[in-house]
Amino acid sequence: MKTSSPDYAQSRYDEVASDYDRLWSRHMEAPQARLTAGLHLSAGESVADIACGTGVITLEMARQSRPGDVVAVDYSENMLAAAERRLVAAGIAPRLVHAQAEHFVDNAAPQSFDVISCRFALAYVDWRTMLPRIGPLLRPGGRVGIVNATSGSIPQAFRAYEDLRDSPRTVWKLMQHFGKDVGRAWALYRSLRQTFGTTRFIPVPDSPEQVAALLEQGGLRRREAWSETVRLWFASGPDAIAWLEESGYATHPGLEHVPERGLRFLREVFAAGLEGFRERQGVPLDIVISGVIAARD
């Protein structure tokens, strides 16, 4: 099961493209830089940046690999347009590909790249089958870098969710929210339990080792596998919930079918739950990042 259908993910990231760097990219500078450094790009290499987003990292890789070819791939048209503007402004003419990550991997020619980068895209693909298919796209000596949040991310939100999921108070809160309309409250409760029945509804990898093992199935040799935690601080639970939505992190197809009144209820109860994790600096959210670099001999 995917975290999000491709079309739903595309529409969500089209919406957040203009604010993506402020909401997401600036927080991920350290793990992004670590992955880029580990790829050891050289002048003249051909690079594919899958799920390039707004092109922040694409530009850095393009500078390091000049005068090599750069292919920027994304399924969000607005993200891809932002990447094009950034690269062209820097004097780089990329080849732009509007495509799902899996579709690009399946249709690229064998041994067509020296370096492939895929960052924060695994929630939107069938990564168990896609990752082994990347190996044949690399030339001898080629490298691939994968960075992604793991299933251990935002534990604060998942713990708040677990408290809500099985608590009779959740139904009571729903009834209060809907003005004691039992029918509507119960219908939404059943819908939420069906869509988000367990904390495994976000099927991203559990660890960098899991990613590395799948790349090895495609004939690649592991060079690095690491993980680190990026902690974000928010002034309040509602601010944390707003960030999860506005950054695109909380992109799940089930939310598309929840009525606005139901979404307001979810925001309220999750915000209250996150307040239970408040520390002196504010309300924390931990993003657990895994990075893997593998190479073709």
Image: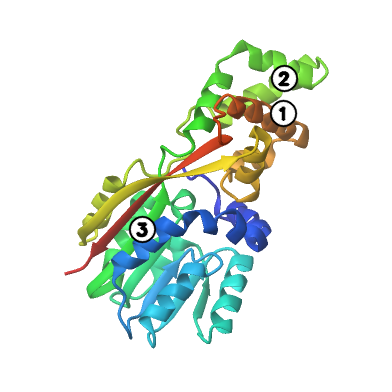
Q: Quadrant of the C terminus?
A: bottom left
Residues 254 and 237: in front is: 237
Which residue is disc 1 drawn over?
265
State the image coordinates of residue 289 (x, y, percent, origin top left): 40, 48
Which residue is disc 2 drawn over?
174
Q: Earlier in the sequence, mark 3 or mark 1?
A: 3
Determine whether the residue tagged by mark 1 lies in a helix, strand or loop.
helix
Q: Residue furthest right?
A: 179
Q: Which mark is residue 146?
A: 3
Q: CA distance from mark 3 to mark 1?
A: 36 Å
Determine whether the residue tagged by mark 2 lies in a helix, strand or loop.
helix
Q: Residues within 10 Å of mark 1 (few under 14, many from 20)?
A: some
State whether residue 159 is above or below residue 76.
above
Give the residue drawn at x 48%, y 45%: 2
Looking at the rendered structure, the kind of residue marked 3 is Ile
State the image coordinates of residue 92 (x, y, percent, origin top left): 50, 85
Q: CA distance from mark 2 to mark 3?
A: 41 Å
State the image coordinates of residue 164 (x, y, percent, origin top left): 58, 20
Give the residue drawn at x 74%, y 33%: 264
Q: Residue furthest front?
A: 280
Q: Residues within 10 Å of mark 3 (few under 14, many from 20)?
A: many
Q: Is residue 223 left or right of residue 43?
A: left
Give the residue drawn at x 36%, y 66%: 36
